[in-house]
Image (tube, coloured by chain):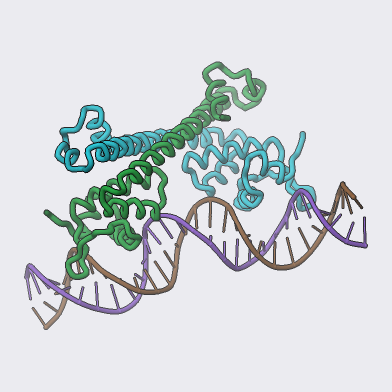
Chain colours: A green, B cyan, C purple, D brown
Amino acid sequence: MRSYGIGQISKMFDLPISTLRYYDKEGLFPDLARYGDRRLFSDREIDALRVIECLKASGLEIKDIKQFMQWCSEGPSTYAKRKQLFEDRRIAVEEEIQQLQKTLDLLNYKCWYYETAMNDGGEDKIQRMLPDGLPEDIQKLYDNSFR
Amino acid sequence: MRSYGIGQISKMFDLPISTLRYYDKEGLFPDLARYGDRRLFSDREIDALRVIECLKASGLEIKDIKQFMQWCSEGPSTYAKRKQLFEDRRIAVEEEIQQLQKTLDLLNYKCWYYETAMNDGGEDKIQRMLPDGLPEDIQKLYDNSFR
DNA sequence: GTAATACCTAAACCTAACTTTAGGTCAAGG
DNA sequence: CCTTGACCTAAAGTTAGGTTTAGGTATTAC
């Protein structure tokens, strides 16, 4: 079983060495091996880092990622908890995507707004169309962005 | 032109009063009126808050939102800059959504993984399918999540 | 008159997630 | 031998985006 120095892992994941040490200090690698004081990263930690990036991207805090990593090192008795965590994160991410879609609708509306204001030489004409006399496709964006 | 107290706005947007004062201090309401020391929010600030929430959701920092609000109070000469900002944010949000889709793929893979591990009574069977002998739909999730 | 309500300011405080600093160990190369 | 490179620790510092605290004013309600 091959092992890697912290510098190799740093390059592999494009993460600063200081961040990897911070993760270790926070308990994200509960079974990390050492040779003296040198950290020896293995495939287990490489897999862990992929999951860490995923859970971080899902909005999970470090302390909760630590909890998950501990479950992993406790073996099969924690499968149910781990599955539940991923299901919760899936729902959180789905909601986040929906929120971003609404954000995107308002951004697109605003792009149209300023494009049109520049062509019209002012906002007055648009303002007279508000709140429900906009071109159909634009009206949709505008309305969506409210809820 | 109706105006609103900070408490009314707080309820309207479900934002703490302290946050509204913080936004004001950071310059997000460049033309906010006052009656003595009382803030008088108008429709202009209500529109501003909708945009603030949108730009914040898009990942923009407060200091850049302030810049945008200043452009707004400088009039038509800044239309082009404002439009550019919204276009940049649109791209940023589109990228963020794509990233979250990959995150979602890994989360869904992990849900399947633990569901299957629980049914199989262990991970060995799954591990033997890695890295490219997974069921077709699952393999897709797993592969997508890498890039 | 006094109590509750709705505000105000300045300044200190908070949290998460890192990053930087200061001072070290150890092995290989010239 | 001595320098370079890769690593180590503990502790202090940083940043964004707020929140809390302490002390005050003005209006309305009983």
Q: Nearer the viewer, residue B29 or B107?
A: B107
x 35%, y 55%: residue: A66
Q: Image quadrant of residue B147?
A: top left
For residue B92, say whether it is visible: no
Residue B131 is situated, as x and y percent measured from the top left of the image, at 17, 38
Residue A76 is situated, as x and y percent measured from the top left of the image, at 26, 48
Q: Nearer the viewer, residue B98 or B92?
A: B98
Q: Quick check: A5 above or below A79?
A: below
Q: Nearer the viewer, residue A19 or B3?
A: A19
For residue A32, say whether it is visible: yes
Q: Quick check: B110 above or below B138?
A: below
Horizontal relation, residue A7 to residue A22: left or right: left
x 42%, y 34%: residue: A94
Q: Image quadrant of residue D4?
A: bottom left
Q: Quick check: A143 above or below B45?
A: above
Q: Quick check: B134 above or below A61?
A: above
Residue B90 is situated, as x and y percent measured from the top left of the image, at 45, 33
Residue A28 is situated, as x and y percent measured from the top left of the image, at 31, 56
Quadrant placement of the C terminus of chain A: top right
Q: Nearer the viewer, residue A127 or B130?
A: B130
Q: Image quadrant of residue B51?
A: top right
x 30%, y 61%: residue: A21
Count of picture labels: 0
Horizontal relation, residue B62 to residue C3: left or right: left
Quadrant placement of the N terminus of chain A: bottom left
Q: In the orientation shown, which residue stands out farthest toward the top?
A: A136
Horizontal relation, residue B41 to residue A59: left or right: right
